[in-house]
Image (cartoon, helix red, strand yellow):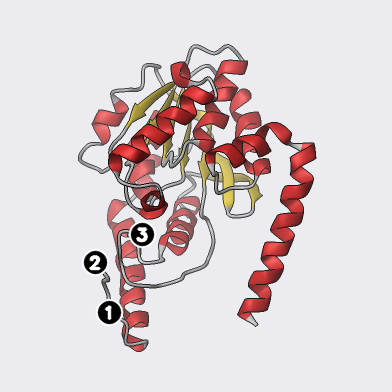
Amino acid sequence: MLQIKSSLKQSVKSLVLSYEQFTNSRFYKLREETNGMLLPIVYRKMYDLCSQLPDLDIIEVGGATGTGSVALAWALKDRQKQSKLIVVEKCEGGTRVDVGGYAENLQLINSHFSKFGVSEQIRLFPKELTFDNGNEAISLIQTPQLAAFVHDADGRIDRDFFLFWPLLCEGGLIIIDDYANEANYQPISERHPLGGAKLILTYRLLNQIIEWGLFKPTHKIGKTIFGIKPSNADFSRFNLATCAKIVDEIEAERKAYLASQKIPVSAI
């Protein structure tokens, strides 16, 4: 049954991509030439929404091969904005192992920025983002506020909301990928640093943030959810301890699942 569902899902995706090849050719080509993971319509939506934002910097956590980064930077360039896109990209681990190590991934993302003509619109922070080095990334912001922040990384949106939400303008755009109540628990490895927990981690953390009134959903395409910073939202409701509890609960679930299947917790 799972194999049938997977095959059907892949068939639908192929049909959508075939349709988008003609109806959304600019973003279809971008996706194909950068090996992007999302549908072209998602990159187009990112572009369209960012085109409407005030001329303030944007920060993206998780550039990967740069597909989404180029779409966002195109919006800045095409609207002749002076603001920049700060791209936080660790350049190693996860799907990046298919490309190589740090140097190969850094070279690849920069080559895509150059190929699609957006190097001048981007400031790259080529490190893994943490609570400790967050101020280094923030120092690259040169406008009084942020127009948007985007997360397509490790599921730790609690870190990103803590660091960037206070800098976001009222009504500012927030884009979160991998929002789905799904888990594919497995051992932690270089290829799977969260052990298959990224989607469910993103889902539960964002639901908590929505409950606190800090994110108002506006659109959803597949597993990518778009929203805004609500007016008069109270950031004092944000609680890192509550977020840490959610993270710990999911890790306990993962370990319990692996134990029930007699699978080692780590494959490193």
- Residue type marked 1: Pro
Front in this rendered view, residue 172 or 57:
57
Residue 126 in percent (x, y) is at: 31, 34
- Helix, strand or loop status at disc 3: loop
Mark 2–mark 1 Cα distance, whole angstroms, equals 10 Å
- Residue type marked 2: Ile
Q: Is residue 219 left or right of residue 165?
A: right
Front in this rendered view, residue 202 or 259:
259
User: Residue under circle 1?
Assistant: 264
- Location of residue 56 with respect to 251 vertically, above or below: above
Q: Is residue 141 left or right of residue 268?
A: right
Classify the position of the N terminus by image quarter: bottom right
User: Residue under circle 2?
Assistant: 268
Residue 197 in percent (x, y) is at: 40, 65
- Location of residue 171 with respect to 189 vertically, above or below: above
Circle on res. 191? 3
- Location of residue 18 with respect to 229 vertically, above or below: below
Residue 40 in percent (x, y) is at: 66, 42
In this view, the mark in front (2 or 1): 2
Picture residue at 72% right of the left edge, 49% below the top: 17
- Helix, strand or loop status at disc 2: loop
Classify the position of the C terminus by image quarter: bottom left
